[in-house]
Image (cartoon, rainbow, N blue to C red):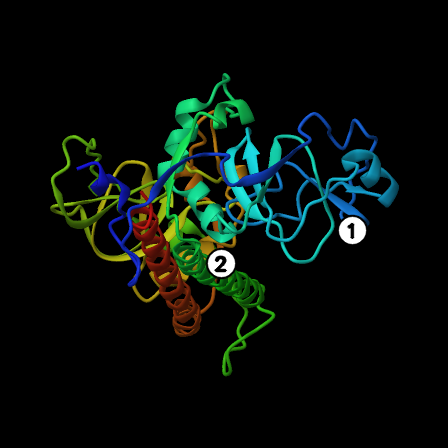
Amino acid sequence: MKVRTLIPNIRFRGFSDPWEQRKFFDNIKQVLDYRGKTPKKLNMKWNEEPKGYLALSAINVKAGYIDKHIETYYASEKLYKKWMGKDSLSAGDILFTTEAPMGNVALVPDKGKYILSQRTIAFKLDKAKLDNLFWLEFLESTIFKSKAVAISSGGTAQGVSQKSLRQVIVIIPSDVNEQKRIGQVLVTVDNLIAANEDKVQQLKTLKKLMMQKIFSQEWRFKGFTDPWEQRKLESVVIVYDKGRVPVTSTERISGDTPYYGANGIQDYVDGYTHDGEFTLIAEDGANDTRNYPIKFVSGKIWVNNHAHVLAGKQNILNTRFLSFSLQQINIEPFLSGSGRAKLNASEMKKLLIAVPNIYEQIKVENFLGEMAHLIAANEDKLNQLKRLKKYLMQNLFV
């Protein structure tokens, strides 16, 4: 029975031996630890331009990569030698954040000059016994993270030390070739996720630019020249708030209907409160008041009391055009309340939107709708990749 616990659920063909239990530091040649030194203590100045050696702290080490665009402190060659002496970071070393946040990892890339700063240590591995990509992914697994939490200490900012890590027993393949296969597969998925995240962000940026051009009327569709008319929201929409029904999570009956709150879908339930095309805009509880939650929905939906439900008046305002138009407005000045900001119905109805004739509205909503579909399709692909990564992480490790 004990042997079964040392075998992962998924194996590559050709590997069948049980994995080994090892102490955390068994295959680590050296640990670089400069957590007592901070850029400010050495009078380093913040600089957004790459000049010299980038000081890596916990804030720069994200989930699998180095963020070079935040807290960028650079050291000169002289300061580098004073700081790290004969030590240096090499390509393939593993960075590990010990606190605030705890457990983020990244691989030192092939190019670049780096020095270690607060709340981050680096592992130099015995590459004959431990593959760096495998170790990188293992440190990100829920199996290891649960061990790290168990040995962590501190108040608000939980952390781990080298001393506490020495208590950890890990289970890994004895065959480095199996380690390499696992690491390569998982890093490949990571790269696909990163590429798709970039693509989604680029599409969103493009859509935002298109919307700015269209709603400023800098761009017009051929055949339309009439100026857009400024209209108060109350004159062009119907409000369907009376149909909203809040249901606590314990009282909801599971089903296929999306259950909407202030920030989008919260659950899927049986039944519905509205059926048709609507624009939802948060009433209270918005997660982001700058990028205010506004969403076009269609079909059967269930809406609670934290989102207003609007539809354009027939032949006056296209409901999907309405959602795009509202996204161009700064909602913050219309919010009330110091804690939980609220968009009262009376204030919402005062919002001014620019309204072209209905035929131009349809042109606009068709064009932007296609972009929204493209973004949604790529987000769906991204989510599939993330689910694949989660599945592999749960089944490739012990």
Q: Residue placed at 32% from the left, 53% from the top? A: 392
**Which residue type does callout 2 highlight?**
Ala
Toward which corner of the image does residue 125 lie, by quadrant?
Answer: top right
The image position of residue 373, as x and y in percent, is 37, 67
Q: Which mark is residue 194?
A: 2
Q: Position of residue 227 (x, y in %)?
A: 55, 69
Residue 41 placement (x, y as % from top left): 79, 26
Kindly indicate the quadrant of the structure image that contains residue 386: bottom left
Q: Is residue 364 visible?
A: yes
Residue 254 lies, in percent from the top left, at 13, 43
Q: Is residue 344 visible?
A: no
**Side (left or right) of 251 relative to 150:** left
Q: Secondary structure at mark 2?
A: helix
Mark 1 crowd level (few <14, some 14–19, many ≥20, 10 Å Cα): few
Residue type at tag 1: Glu
**Element at label 1:** loop
Can you name the residue that lies furthest to the right here? 78
Figure check: 326 above or below 334: below
Quadrant where the C terminus is found in the figure: top left
Q: In the visual, does 270 lie left or right of 384? A: left
Residue identified by numbered label 1: 49
Q: Residues within 10 Å of mark 2 (few under 14, many from 20)?
A: some
Q: Residues at badges 2 and 1 in contact (C-beta under 8 Å)?
A: no
Q: Is residue 320 left or right of residue 273?
A: right
Q: Earlier in the sequence, mark 2 or mark 1?
A: 1
